[in-house]
């Protein structure tokens, strides 16, 4: 029986014309719901992998180290990043792992190509630095790369302080590691809470942080998740407004429209957002009322009723 060759992998969405993944490569990004888990691969399982590098230094080095770990000796790693989001550091970081690097520049990105050395150096330390961990100050599990991974987001803190006790069935859109969900679950009248997030790392942390039997947790896209229209009494959210590092106001607006779709008549949306984000118009379009309940520290909170 012929032995199957190692697989090809891709992490994220490397821009076309910058660096191309092998056709049919397996997706490993934790930000793509349903993708494979890079950490779950055995050492030397891949022949090649193509990465769009994360912008955060700790997260980027973690992904590089995991990629080198799962490559067979001599396997090819191609990695790209915008010059102002880690691209200028790619070569130096790869060389620190013992790689010989070919570097190119295209469309405001740096592209580095390297072969896995026989004995890379420093992989274990980089993997440990970027791995999931229990954060003593947060009193919660978290991981570098997750939204507000090492501090309580001030917008979420304001919403948790402002919203009234919740009752019935609800959802936390973009739940992260579960900070807002914990606050919501403090209400004894809450019957069930669905946590949804598109970041697998956040979902895995939330599963460790939220032990309440009323909670269920889903790795998925809020905009397409299978939630019956008109089935919920409330939605809480601190919606994202960046996609791939670029501000995208339409993302938060889509979360608001989705909340209106899944809420029953007279259901409530509790929303916090940065003050500059233009959500008032879409709130007025899809909700009967949406009064402001707090406006401080650069954040605004709305209680919108369908």
Image (cartoon, grey):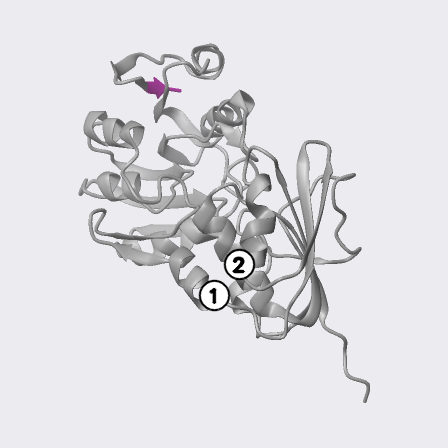
Which residue is located at x 20 percent, y 32 percent? 165
Q: Nearer the viewer, residue 138 or 122?
A: 122
Residue 185 forms part of the magenta stretch: no
**In the rendered image, which residue does mark 2 sit on?**
96
- Asked whether disc 1 touches disc 2, contact meaning CB atoms under 8 Å apart, the reply is yes
Q: Position of residue 116 (x, y in %)?
A: 65, 67
Residue 139: percent from left, percent from top = 21, 51
Picture layout, residue 282 above or below residue 134:
above
Q: Mark 1 — residue?
A: 122
What separation in Å lies between label 1 and label 2 (alpha carbons)?
A: 8 Å
How far across and how far down the image is residue 73, in percent? 67, 73
Q: Position of residue 212 (x, y in %)?
A: 26, 54
Q: Is residue 235 above or below residue 78?
A: above
Residue 304 is one of the magenta-drawn residues: yes
Q: Secondary structure at mark 2?
A: helix
The image quadrant where one finds the N terminus is: bottom right
Residue at coordinates 56% horizontally, 32% vertically from top-left?
84
Q: Write down the region rendered in magenta.
A: 302-306
Q: Locate residue 111 relative to residue 65 in the image: left or right.
A: right
* Quadrant position of residue 100: bottom right
Give the crowd class for mark 2: few <14, some 14-19, many >=20 residues within 10 Å.
Answer: some
Q: Is residue 37 visible?
A: no
Give whichever of 160, 130 is nearer the camera: 130
Which of the two marks, 1 or 2, is nearer to us in this view?
A: 2
The quadrant in which the C terminus is found is top left
Secondary structure, magenta segment, majority class: strand
Say whether residue 102 is visible: yes
Identify which residue is drawn at 70% across, 70% down.
Answer: 74
Q: Residue at x 28, y 42 (%)?
A: 179
């Amino acid at each position: 029986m012929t032995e199957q060759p190692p697989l090809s992998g891709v992490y994220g969405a490397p821009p076309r014309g910058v660096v191309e993944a092998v056709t049919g490569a397996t997706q490993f990004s934790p930000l793509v719901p349903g993708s494979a888990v890079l950490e779950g691969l055995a050492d030397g399982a891949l022949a090649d992998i193509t990465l769009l590098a994360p912008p955060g230094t700790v997260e980027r080095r973690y992904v590089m180290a995991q990629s080198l770990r799962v490559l067979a000796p001599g396997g090819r790693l191609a990695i790209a990043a915008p010059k102002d989001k880690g691209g200028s550091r790619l070569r130096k970081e790869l060389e620190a792992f013992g790689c010989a690097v070919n570097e190119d520049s295209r469309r405001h990105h740096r592209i580095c190509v390297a072969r896995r050395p026989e004995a890379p150096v420093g992989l274990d330390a980089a993997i440990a630095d970027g791995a999931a961990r229990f954060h003593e100050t947060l009193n919660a599990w978290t991981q570098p790369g997750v939204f507000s991974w090492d501090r309580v987001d001030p917008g979420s803190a304001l919403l948790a302080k402002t919203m009234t006790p919740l009752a019935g069935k609800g959802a936390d859109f973009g739940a992260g590691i579960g900070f807002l969900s914990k606050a919501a679950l403090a209400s004894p009248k809450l019957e069930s809470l669905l946590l949804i997030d598109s970041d697998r790392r956040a979902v895995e942390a939330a599963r460790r942080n939220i032990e309440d039997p009323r909670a269920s947790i889903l790795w998925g896209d809020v905009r397409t998740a299978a939630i019956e229209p008109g089935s919920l009494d409330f939605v809480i959210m601190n919606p994202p407004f960046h996609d791939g590092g670029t501000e995208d106001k339409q993302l938060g607006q889509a979360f608001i429209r989705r909340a209106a779709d899944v809420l029953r008549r007279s259901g409530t949306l509790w929303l916090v957002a940065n003050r500059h984000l233009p959500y008032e118009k879409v709130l007025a379009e899809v909700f009967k009322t949406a009064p402001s309940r707090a406006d401080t520290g650069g954040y605004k909170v709305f209680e919108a009723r369908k």
